[in-house]
Image: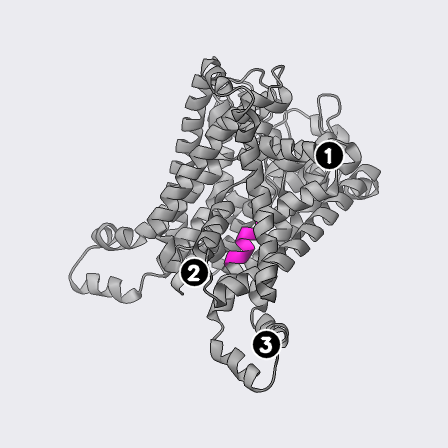
């Protein structure tokens, strides 16, 4: 009974977090009905912002998965110095996202950034590029940082998946005369599927909700041209001339529902119930 | 030979991952004048380790550091105090609503406060808690609690019941068993939870940006951005402060890495 009473406390904590969820909807359900949602649909910026979000999430998650798979495969091999790579992989993960974002603003800088310096020196580009000011490169520059910070977690998840595949499976494939590629496609990838799904859906959720990168790298540009739904919502609520909490909250509800949908897909895929029976 | 090739490839990968942070460190060691040389140079020509002293002596930095430490430490304490009993209870007992409770935990874990930030602001505004430690501590604690409960539940569940039964036979009360038998056995889990909750709170940005508008109440993540604004551009100080904030966190993170993946992929890794 004592423990039962103490369990209530974290439950209250969780409800506190969830209360804010209710307060978003509670805010206008009584006040203006669905009018905020109707106005949200009329915002000119909504279409481009939704498209940006798709590009951002799709590109970051896709690229992260491909690169992480290669990295995990590599780290699954034995070689001297492997610890160094694993250790290096931790740095972008542990470092504060806002600090990493500021760092990339500096590296991408038109005049003083080392990226332009290196690219010009290597004759990849003829002159410096205004990565964060040019409409054609901003999204790409942000995606680069997004992938960079998503790699560590994803690689570790896939590596854990790879290491859980028993060695005998590979041996059996070899005995059956399967070539390296054939073994990879027919044995490794199917067995890695659960880890890939987990990595994909969790990244989908993290990247969709990512704030500091877009917020910091897109700081110079006026309007909502390169915003995602998350930073757009934030600007509506706190920064733009709109300062419209009702409208932002309507978008907030949409964002929460989208995240919730992804979470449910995730829980359904990993069959969460089974893991309670441990 | 092949192994040597892998080692070289590995070093290149490590370099690619660390290169941006190397730029951070080297920029932190440059004097103000060298920030604006065109074309830029990687290495400082006049090394200025004094930038770190300047930052440490800056009252602004000291204030942000204090806020970050208070928020991270207290929210971590809150997480541990709440998560240990909750995790133990869900690991050992079957009670009504257990499934619902665990589902709620899982859903919270996957939620970032970012999507909810407008709601959080409304809530704390109405409670008059904007610019208070409590607002930030409670938010951080609530969002890190899920990971903590999940992580610890797995640890408690892995301790055989027989150990506790033996303690009971030897005359230990329930509380005594918990404190002197179960908790020491779950120590790696508790250490992981402490470090994870601390780092998550330490790195949190968007809630702090929204709720802590008073300059005296800003934590490091929000405060350091004032080194580079439209009016002042102390990139070297910004990166000296960032380096100071990142190095301890990376070391702590390396300690818990083996447990972290299992904890973050909650429910899927058996």
Q: Are marks 1 and 3 on the same chain?
A: yes
Q: Residue at x 59, y 75 (%)?
A: B174
Residue placed under numbered mark 1 in the picture = B128
Q: Nearer the viewer, residue B177 or A239?
A: B177
Give the class, few, some or many, for how many residues have Cα within 10 Å of label 1's Cα (few <14, many ≥20): few
**Chain letter of the residue beneath label 2 in the structure image:** A
Please tell me whether residue A119 is drawn above or below residue B97 in the rendered image: above
Element assignment for label 2: loop
Q: CA distance from mark 1 to mark 3?
A: 43 Å
List x then y, in percent, for residue B148: 56, 56
Return the mark for residue A79. Answer: 2
Lower sequence index among marks 1 and 3: 1
Q: Residue at x 54, y 65 (%)?
A: B88
Q: Residue at x 59, y 68 (%)?
A: B187
Q: CA distance from mark 1 to mark 2?
A: 57 Å
Region in magenta? B144-150
Q: Are marks 2 and 3 on the same chain?
A: no
Give the class, few, some or many, for how many residues have Cα within 10 Å of label 2's Cα (few <14, many ≥20): some
Q: Are marks 1 and 2 on the same chain?
A: no
Q: Nearer the viewer, residue B45 or A31?
A: A31
Q: CA distance from mark 2 to mark 3?
A: 40 Å
List x then y, in percent, for residue B73: 70, 52
Element assignment for label 1: loop
Return the mark for residue B181. Answer: 3
């Amino acid at each position: 009974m004592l423990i039962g009473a103490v369990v209530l406390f974290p439950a209250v904590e969780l409800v506190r977090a969830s209360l804010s969820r209710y307060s978003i909807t509670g805010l206008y359900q009584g006040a203006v009905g669905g009018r905020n949602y109707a106005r949200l649909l009329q915002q000119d910026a909504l279409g481009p912002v939704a498209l940006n979000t798709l590009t951002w999430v799709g590109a970051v998650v896709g690229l992260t998965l491909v690169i992480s798979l290669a990295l995990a495969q590599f780290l699954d091999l034995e070689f001297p110095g492997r610890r160094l790579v694993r250790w290096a992989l931790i740095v972008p993960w542990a470092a504060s996202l806002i600090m990493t974002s500021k760092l990339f603003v500096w590296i991408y800088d038109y005049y003083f950034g080392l990226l332009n310096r290196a690219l010009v020196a290597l004759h990849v580009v003829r002159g410096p590029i205004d990565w964060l000011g040019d409409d054609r490169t901003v999204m790409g520059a942000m995606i680069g940082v997004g992938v960079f910070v998503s790699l560590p977690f994803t690689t570790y998840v896939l590596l854990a998946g790879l290491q859980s595949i028993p060695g005998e499976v590979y041996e059996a494939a070899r005995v059956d005369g399967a070539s390296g590629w054939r073994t990879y496609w027919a044995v490794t990838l199917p067995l890695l599927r659960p880890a890939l799904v987990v990595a994909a859906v969790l990244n989908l959720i993290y990247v969709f909700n990512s704030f500091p990168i877009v917020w910091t790298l897109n700081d110079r540009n006026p309007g909502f041209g390169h915003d995602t739904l998350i930073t757009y919502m934030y600007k509506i609520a706190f920064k733009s001339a709109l300062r419209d909490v009702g409208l932002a909250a309507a978008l907030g509800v949409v964002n929460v529902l989208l995240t919730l949908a992804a979470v449910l897909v995730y829980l359904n895929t990993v069959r969460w119930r089974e893991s309670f029976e441990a | 030979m092949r192994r040597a090739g892998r080692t070289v490839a590995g070093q290149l990968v490590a370099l690619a991952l660390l290169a941006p942070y190397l730029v951070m460190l080297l920029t932190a060691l440059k004097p103000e004048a060298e920030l604006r040389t065109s074309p830029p140079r990687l290495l400082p020509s006049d090394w200025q380790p004094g930038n770190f002293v300047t930052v440490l002596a800056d009252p602004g930095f000291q204030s942000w550091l204090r806020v970050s430490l208070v928020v991270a430490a207290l929210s971590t304490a809150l997480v541990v105090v709440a998560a240990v009993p909750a995790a133990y209870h869900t690991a050992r007992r079957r009670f009504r609503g257990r499934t619902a409770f665990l589902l709620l935990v899982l859903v919270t874990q996957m939620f970032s406060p970012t999507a909810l930030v407008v709601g959080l602001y409304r809530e704390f505004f109405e409670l008059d808690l904007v610019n208070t430690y409590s607002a930030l501590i409670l938010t951080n604690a609530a969002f890190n609690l899920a990971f903590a409960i999940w992580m610890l539940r797995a640890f408690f569940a892995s301790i055989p019941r027989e150990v506790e039964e033996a303690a009971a036979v030897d005359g230990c009360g329930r509380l005594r068993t918990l404190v002197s038998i179960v908790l020491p056995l779950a120590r790696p889990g508790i250490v992981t939870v402490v470090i994870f909750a601390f780092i998550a709170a330490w790195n949190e940005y968007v809630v702090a940006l929204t709720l802590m508008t008073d300059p005296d109440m800003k934590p490091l993540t929000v405060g350091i951005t004032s080194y580079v604004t439209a009016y002042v551009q102390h990139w070297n100080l910004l990166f000296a402060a960032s380096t100071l904030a990142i190095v301890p966190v990376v070391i702590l993170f390396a300690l818990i890495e083996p447990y972290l993946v299992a904890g973050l992929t909650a429910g899927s890794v058996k």
